């Protein structure tokens, strides 16, 4: 099995469509959470649902928070954003994304048993960035019986090995914190290929996503870690 890991699309339909054009028809697509939001939340969700059995789904914190509305937190959604996202979806769509699993394991060619999660295997909010010390990441992967973990959440690609486990962040299709514009994703099997795809951002109709460089984003996220 080969897998295209598409995380953190955040309603960016033009970015998603550009990435899907690059994914071979026989490749499994893991939808890694935080699909909705942005200017095309409902349309993005339906474009992915149209993939049928090709898609393997995970729930991100955004999908969970549509139902379990959280108290304000540093780095969380701005006031009113969850209500706006939910208003863009039908009740059936909200029920669908809220009911998705938090983790999925797949056997991937050349990589072995791979655990897919949104943020970390334990929850959908904890932070891992390129600046996260190996010691802290080792505690996160301790006890896992997998060869690799693929996550997203912090919108920055990375690929490293800690405590015998390969840790991959697939990046963000729709709202990357990278040093060049584009849609970021990962192609898995037989190795890990971190990919960037150009797309026509003018199709967003003037909608602007938050942006930051890799260094800026990593330093900010790490400042939130207790």
Image (cartoon, grey):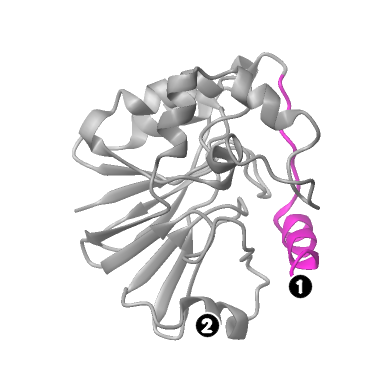
Is residue 209 magenta-colored? yes
Question: Contact (CB < 8 A) between labels 2 and 1?
Answer: no
Residue at 59% across, 34% down: 66
Q: Position of residue 86 (x, y in %)?
A: 60, 24
Is residue 154 magenta-colored? no
Residue at 65% across, 73% down: 132
Magenta residue span = 207-226
Query: Tag 2's secondary structure?
Result: helix
Using the image, determine if residue 82 lies above or below residue 128. above
Single out the mark in the foreground, 2 or 1: 1
Is residue 87 found left or right of 114 in the rendered image?
Answer: right
Residue annotated with mark 2: 138
Residue at 55% across, 57% down: 157
Q: Position of residue 19 (x, y in %)?
A: 42, 34
Residue annotated with mark 1: 226
Which numbered circle lies on residue 8? none
């Amino acid at each position: 099995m080969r897998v295209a890991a598409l995380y953190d699309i955040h309603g960016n339909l033009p970015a998603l469509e550009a990435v899907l054009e690059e994914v071979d028809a026989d490749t499994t697509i893991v939808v890694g959470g935080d699909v909705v939001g942005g200017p095309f939340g409902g349309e993005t969700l339906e474009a992915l649902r149209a993939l049928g059995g090709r898609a393997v789904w995970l729930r991100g914190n955004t999908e969970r928070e549509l139902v379990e509305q959280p108290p304000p937190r540093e780095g969380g959604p701005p006031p009113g954003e969850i209500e706006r996202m939910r208003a863009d979806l039908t009740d059936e769509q909200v029920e669908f994304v809220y009911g998705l699993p938090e983790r999925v394991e797949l056997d991937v060619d050349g990589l072995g048993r791979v655990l897919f999660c949104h943020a970390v295997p334990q929850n959908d909010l904890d932070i891992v960035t390129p600046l996260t010390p190996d010691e802290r990441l080792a505690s996160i992967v301790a006890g896992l019986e997998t060869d690799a973990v693929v996550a997203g959440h912090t919108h920055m690609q990375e690929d490293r090995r800690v405590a015998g486990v390969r840790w991959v962040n697939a990046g963000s299709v729709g709202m990357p914190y990278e040093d060049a514009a584009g849609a970021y994703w990962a192609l898995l099997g037989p190795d890990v290929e971190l990919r960037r795809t150009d797309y026509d951002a003018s199709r967003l109709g003037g909608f602007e996503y938050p942006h930051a460089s890799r260094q800026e984003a990593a330093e900010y996220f790490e400042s939130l870690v207790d």
